[in-house]
Structures are given as C-alpha cells and as structure tokens.
Amino acid sequence: MIVGIDFGTCYSSAAIMSGLIPVTNFIKDHEGMGVPSLFMYSAEKGKELYGRDCTTAEALRHSADIIRYMKRTVREDPANLGKTVSSGGKEYTLSEVIEKYLTFLISEIKSAAIKSGEYSNTDIEMITITAPVGIAAGQMMASEYNQLLQDAVMRITGLPKENVRILQEPVAAAISYLYSEDVRTHYDGTQKILVFDLGGGTLDVSIVEHDPVTMEYRILAKEGDLNLGGNDWDAVLRERILEKTVGKWTGTEEEEARFNNSVTKAKMELTEMDEAIVLFSMAGQDRFVRINRREFEDCTAHLLERAMDVVDKARDFDEGSSVDKIVLVGGSSNMPQIRDGIISRTGFRPEDVMVYEPSKAIAKGAAVFSKMNFQTDGSAMGPRVMDMVTLTYGFDSRYHSERDAIYNMIYKGDRFGDNGMIVVDSDSSFIPLRDNQNRVSFIVYESENLRGTGFDENWYDLNSGETQNGLVVTVQVPPEFLGKARGFRMYATMSLDVNGILELTVTDPSGKKLAFGKRSVSSDSQRGDEQ
C-alpha cells in the first residue's frame, strides 16, 4: 500500500492510493473529521486508549487524563518533545505519546484496509507523513519534530528511510488540489495556490507555486498563528452560551466535558444551519440555549480578523505574480465566515476561493506524494519541494563603534539550494569591543527583518523586534592579542539547512576556524565590534 498520513493537532486522517486515486473512506469516520488525536491511560481498564476511545463516557469522567494537542505543544517549543506528561497515574514523555499514537494510527490503517477487502496487498510499501511548515516565532524550524516523525514511522513499519517521507502540510494540500485539477483538466502553465489551513489548534497560510514541467513545488510565503484554531471559536461560543444561561460553569468535570462536546457540535451545525440548540446538564439540572449563525459570527469576529491578518501578511510577503486560487483546508475552514471573510478581504472571485476537502486534502496530498516518489527499483523520482527560510538570522555587534546593532546574514524568504543548504559568509570583519577583552561572544538573533530594509546593507537597529534564539558562539582572543584585542579580526559564516539546523562558524583572516556552534548556549556575552 502507498499511504499518506495527516497527523493533526485535533484530528488525524489517512489516505491510500487506489491505483492513481487517493481514497480516505476505508476508515469509518461518522463525523467526517478524521481520527481524534487523543491518548490516555485508563486506570479503570488498565490499558492505553487512543482516538475515539478517549471520547467515551468512561474517558470523559477522567478528562484531565486525556492528552491532547500533541503537535501544538511541540510547535510551541521543540524541547517539549522530552516533556513528561501524566495520564491515569502513569508518566510518559511527549515523544513517547506521539510514537504510541502513530503506532495506533498505522495499525488502524492496515486493519481498515484489510476489512475493506479492496486491497490485495495490505503491506505498507511507501508512507508520507505531514508536518507543519515550522515552529512558533522565537523557535527554530521543526528539525527535531520532523526527525522524530520519520524515525518513529520507520520503527513502526520497518521501512527504510527512503520509503518514509516528511512533507510540509501546505505543500500536501497544494499537491492534492493540483493533482485533482490535473486529472480533470490538464494544465501546462505554472500554478500559484494560497493554502489557508485552519485546524483545531493552529492556522497556517502558505503560498505554493507548482511548475508541472520541472515538477517543483516552490514555497513562496508562509505565515501563521500558532495560537489560533477552531478551538478558539469553540471557546468564544462556550462563553457566549454561558452568558446567556448560567453565567459561569459550576458543574462536574464529566458534565463540563459533555458540555464542551455539545458546543463543538453546535458550531458544526451552524455551518449548515442558521440556528443550533445546545442541550447540557450542570449540577444535575438540564438546560438549553438557542444560538444563531449571525450571533456566532458577531462574537467571533475578532478571531476572523486575526486570521485575515495572517492572509494579508502572506500576500504582502509574496510580491510576485498574483495567486491563481485560494484553497481552504483544515476542518475549521468549513465555517462559512472563513470563506466569506477571505473573499471580502482579498477581493477574489468567489469561484476562485474554495473549501477543498478540509479534513482529507492533506492526507490525500501526502498519499499522492508517496505515489510519485515510490519506485520499485529504489530510485528516488517524483516532485521536489523548494523551501524558503521563515525568519531572518543574524548576531549582535556594534556598527563602527557607534551604535548597537544586528548584523543579519540569512534572510526571511531566502531559498535553499539544491543541496538543501544556505551558506553565507560575512561581508564585514569583526573585532573585540575593548582592548582588554579576552573573548568575544556572537549572540544569534532571529527576526522578521527583510533584506534591504536595514540602515546599511546587512545592518539593522538592535531592539527592532528580534529575539535571541539560543545559539551563542564564543571566541577566545589569541594570546598574542591580549591587551590589544581590537587589533584582532574575525569573520563569520552562517549556514542553515532544510531540517532547521543553524550553524555559525567564526574564522580568522587566514580562514582558520576559531569557534563553531549549533545553538549552544552561553551566559556570558561580551560582544564584538564591526570593523
């Protein structure tokens, strides 16, 4: 089987290639949302539970034991992979929970495929699992997370590395849409798609360009809001319902879990209907409230505005040719206000803004990508994904002894080369700030600064929105320059690869390496001066 998996914040889905067509209906999915991304240890049953088993009455009685939002927790900080979480009196690391859930999901895929009777071969031969485009602002790209996914799937399936691929979610959505379009009406020209992916916990907006001749998918812009998702619409609706009835919640934990489920159900009903009724119990008393779509949209208008700001940011960054289509994916994109808001904000024709299989598109795109890359002879064929840098990287220094500044080297929007690397040498040399220094620390910062917007070439004002990213490289001043350190010159080389590994190397004028680091941390920061 050729498989694609969308490991989502709230729901996960999978697709299998049936000939040339990706299919998702082999797994029973009554809600049409996928498999809940949930895990818990049930002390009552003495075993681990996954997916819909974590939504039963017994599970809801112990809702605090349900581990949710695995992916978003990692996106907030890759270090959370090693974070300990508790469930039912047992402790796990988050990376263990993710691997256990993926083991369950892959087992479900194989079991459902066997039961369907549609597949003569139910052994997985090639699998692609999707990952976000990056990590939250202030963090590096998702190298640790991506590696965890690939290693876990290799262990679970027994497949070699070349048969387990990681694909960025917006690219998967673009592949799914463009593949279906190509099947229906073949196109020869380049297509540029804005992918709006609003899931349960996060929002990602990317612009992806596809060249059908070179089979390249180029990421031209990617923006997002890590703290905005369908759950936020649920939370606002929840508060509005309480305002209209009891004011504040005073019921039991199980009642609250059931109430929250009723709120989510009402939100989904308002996608199709003008009015929904929420029935719930609190402190043993039954209650109900009516809510209409207009009221729901009015009280969540501020969330829609946040989402539209992300769209604007992506479009502003990509100043090239106009987007051909806007494709909405992610279960929360089903809300009518999302499509209406995008049409209003962008001015696009309604026929060019489409809700495209919100809960299935990413999994289908991953399966198609697997198919394109699977070769029985082991050769690596298929499309190439041309990625871009999402943040600007530089280090602090002093500009000609006049002002504290940031010297940026790698810029947001820079493209990775064919080898998956960006390597930049500094145009300037750097010297210690004072003659009596015995070491100099290069403290790396990341920011949203764009190339050419500084006050002089690569120089930007300090304290203009940048944050330290944790990489500090310290150079010891050679003995022959002690007491006259300002006569000592240094040069910097910075590199970044598509897996998010940022390196900084400092050399002397002869090219001899003086110091090197990959996000190593130092608490002492005697800065240098540009020369």
Image: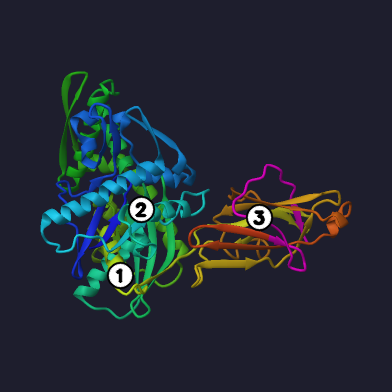
Q: Residue at x 63, y 53 (%)?
A: 444
Residue 41, quarter of picture: top left
Front residue of 80/45: it is 45
Relative vertical location of residue 65 with respect to residue 444 in this rendering, above or below: above
Stretch of the chain drawn in magenta: 506-531
Q: Quadrant of the N terminus?
A: bottom left
Left or right of 518: which side holds 133? left
Q: CA distance from mark 1 to mark 3?
A: 42 Å
Instruction: Categorize mark 3 by other alpha carbons within 10 Å: few (<14), some (14-19), many (20+).
Output: many
Residue 19 placed where, x, y %?
Answer: 18, 70
- Viewer-nearest of discs 1 and 2: 2
Give the labeled residue for mark 3.
395
Left or right of 292: which side holds 195? right
Left or right of 363: which side holds 69? right
Residues at marks 2 and 3 touching, judged by CB atoms closer than 8 Å: no
* Amino acid type at image mark 1: Phe
Residue 293 placed where, x, y %?
Answer: 21, 43
Q: Residue at x 57, y 53 (%)?
A: 446
Q: Earlier in the sequence, mark 2 or mark 3?
A: 2
* Amino acid type at image mark 2: Arg
Give the labeled residue for mark 2.
155
Q: CA distance from mark 2 to mark 3?
A: 39 Å
Residue 411 seen from this side = no
Residue 366 seen from this side = yes
Residue 163, quarter of picture: bottom left
Give the labeled residue for mark 1.
374
